[in-house]
């Protein structure tokens, strides 16, 4: 039984003809041209934008396409807001810790910093790292050699969770290389001192107006890891630095306690499971029209036949694994919520004459039957085929259908022949996908509950302090539904073609950040009496890019 890679991201980007989303059908052109809008004169209301500081994580920094790079920072939401504040009101200078290039990625003492590589670009089929198209592209931003000089008005720190804003030494390089890490290389670049905190550096500038958008990573980290336990959701309860509620309260209290008359717009947490990172890879990508997969289906169904008999006998028919020759087939996944039937499967297979014959057909002696039965029991004891309720992280597209080399080596080490080891190591087919690749319904519910609780904290804190509130949760849900129209464009959440999300499937494009800036200005209008919207001074999102050329490196 051969195994082949049978899915690629190019199969997931349907009907792709360009990187820009097309304007809406202009049926109105058939009728009389509309009257031009009449706008009010701009008024600043009660807002004081004289010193604006943005606090948050990657969504504040302008992170896009899997990294931070210069042109994306220049088109970050805070940069767009600062331009409007300075042009129309009393806004002052806005300084950002710009990267050295449009390649992205970080160095430390001339060496690449693991996990911080160059940006993603579009190769015509899907996202790929920039060096795969531009071989000479390599990072030039060195956190130990060429950090810019602050203070910085944009204190968005990619990767930061709520409690990191209060963490001393979050910008100390020694913490970056510690195990586990206690510092963030992006904050190393902007911290006023190794021992400072993000909030302390914000307060030191005595801002009159801030934007605070934090908490996304408190649930996103768990989601990106497939809920495998390596990056848990921040608990709701606990003291500052531990529980979200008291941490968020301490952040705001520290700001308002040190900044009299502070004004702010705060953002809540989006429903992260609606972003393309979790909605692009289908649960049933195994195509029987692909001859490399189709020829394996009879043997696959024979192998799983005996296991399915066990499932049926135990009343676990929803766990039956069967492949169709007529329709798209679901992936096989590991589900830790299922009762472990390893022992029952192994015991039943050892007693099955059909299984004994199958093992012998692989060229193994009858004495190998118990070992192979134990192998299958351990592999499929908590396995099932995926359903439409399961979500798959975007990187899973690169491994589905591939033979897992580590699994093969482990089986060979147990005395399983190389060929048979390979046959039982095809990701998502004969080897159930690990938890890190899949968000199960129970894990999605954990995310939904935490997001709802955290957003209640954010909204109540905003109301108690008279701050404007960006309902990012509602906005991103509308984008996911394709219901957001601006400047004759519809923004959707589909990868590459939707216009709102960059190639990492998590962070917005420059156009998406412009849309968020407009929504923040609308919230400021409602709270502080400005009229950015009524005066026609929102930004035109059509003037902002979705994807940037691979040739843009400097």
Image (cartoon, rainbow, N blue to C red):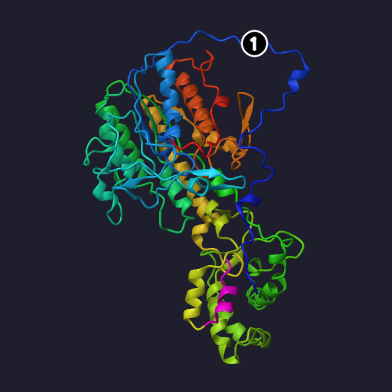
Q: In x, y percent, where is residue 118? A: 44, 45
Point out the image quarter for the C terminus. top left
Q: Which residue is mark 1?
A: 36
Residue in the image at 64% along x and 72% along y:
2
Residue in the image at 66% along x and 84% along y:
358
Image position of 153 (left or right of 125): left
Which quarter of the figure has residue 417?
Answer: bottom right
- Name the secondary structure under disc 1: loop
Residue 443 or residue 412, whichever sits in front: 412
**Magenta residues (range):** 416-427
Q: In x, y percent, where is residue 169? A: 24, 44
Number of labelled discs? 1
Residue 126 or residue 168, whichever sits in front: 126
Image position of 136 (left or right of 246): right
Residue in the image at 63% along x and 65% along y:
4
Q: In x, y percent, where is residue 304? A: 65, 74
417 is within the stretch colored magenta? yes
383 is within the stretch colored magenta? no
């Amino acid at each position: 039984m051969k195994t082949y890679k049978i899915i690629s991201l190019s199969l997931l980007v349907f009907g792709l003809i360009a990187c820009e989303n097309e304007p809406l059908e202009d049926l109105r052109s058939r009728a009389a041209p509309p009257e031009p809008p009449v706008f009010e004169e701009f008024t600043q209301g009660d807002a004081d934008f004289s010193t604006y500081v943005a606090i948050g994580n990657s969504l504040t920094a302008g992170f896009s396409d899997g990294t931070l790079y210069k042109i994306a920072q220049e088109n970050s939401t805070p940069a767009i807001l600062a331009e409007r504040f300075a042009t129309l009101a009393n806004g002052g200078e806005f300084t950002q810790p710009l990267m050295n290039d449009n390649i992205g990625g970080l160095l430390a003492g001339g060496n690449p910093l693991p996990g911080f590589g160059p940006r993603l670009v579009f190769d015509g089929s899907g996202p790929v790292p920039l060096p795969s198209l531009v071989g000479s592209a390599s990072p030039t931003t060195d956190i130990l050699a060429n950090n810019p000089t602050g203070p910085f008005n944009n204190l968005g720190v990619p990767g930061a969770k709520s409690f990191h804003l209060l963490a001393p030494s979050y910008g100390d390089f020694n913490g970056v290389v510690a195990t586990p890490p206690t510092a963030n290389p992006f904050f190393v670049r902007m911290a006023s001192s190794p021992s400072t905190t993000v909030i302390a550096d914000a307060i030191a500038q005595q801002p009159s107006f801030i934007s605070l958008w934090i908490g996304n990573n408190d649930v996103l980290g768990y989601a990106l890891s497939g809920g495998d336990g390596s990056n848990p959701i921040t608990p709701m309860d606990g003291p500052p630095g531990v529980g979200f509620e008291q941490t968020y309260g301490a952040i705001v209290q520290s700001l308002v306690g040190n900044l009299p008359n502070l004004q702010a717009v705060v953002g809540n947490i989006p429903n992260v499971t609606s972003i393309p990172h979790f909605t692009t890879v289908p649960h049933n990508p195994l195509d029987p029209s692909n001859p490399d997969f189709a020829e394996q289906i009879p043997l696959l169904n024979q192998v799983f036949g005996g296991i399915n008999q066990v499932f049926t006998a135990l009343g676990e028919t929803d766990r039956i694994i069967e492949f169709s020759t007529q329709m798209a087939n679901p992936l096989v996944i590991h589900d830790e919520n299922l009762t472990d039937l390893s022992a029952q499967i192994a015991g039943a297979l050892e007693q099955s004459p059909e299984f004994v014959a199958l093992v012998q057909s692989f060229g193994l002696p009858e004495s190998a039957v118990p070992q192979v039965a134990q192998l299958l029991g351990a592999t499929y004891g908590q396995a099932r085929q995926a359903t439409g309720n399961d979500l798959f992280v975007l990187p899973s597209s690169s491994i589905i259908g591939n033979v897992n080399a580590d699994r093969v080596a482990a089986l060979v080490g147990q005395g399983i022949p190389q060929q048979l080891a390979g046959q039982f190591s095809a990701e998502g087919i004969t080897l159930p996908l690990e938890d890190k690749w899949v968000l199960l319904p129970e894990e999605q519910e954990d995310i939904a509950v935490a997001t709802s609780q955290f957003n209640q904290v954010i909204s109540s804190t905003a109301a108690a302090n008279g701050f404007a509130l960006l309902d990012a949760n509602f906005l991103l849900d509308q984008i996911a539904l394709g219901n957001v129209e601006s400047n004759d464009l519809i923004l959707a959440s589909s990868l590459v073609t939707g216009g709102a999300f960059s190639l990492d499937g998590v962070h917005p494009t420059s156009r998406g950040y412009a849309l968020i800036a407009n929504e923040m200005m609308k919230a400021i209008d409602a709270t502080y009496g400005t009229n950015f919207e009524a005066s026609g001074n929102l930004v035109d999102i059509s003037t902002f890019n979705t994807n940037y050329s691979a040739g843009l490196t400097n």
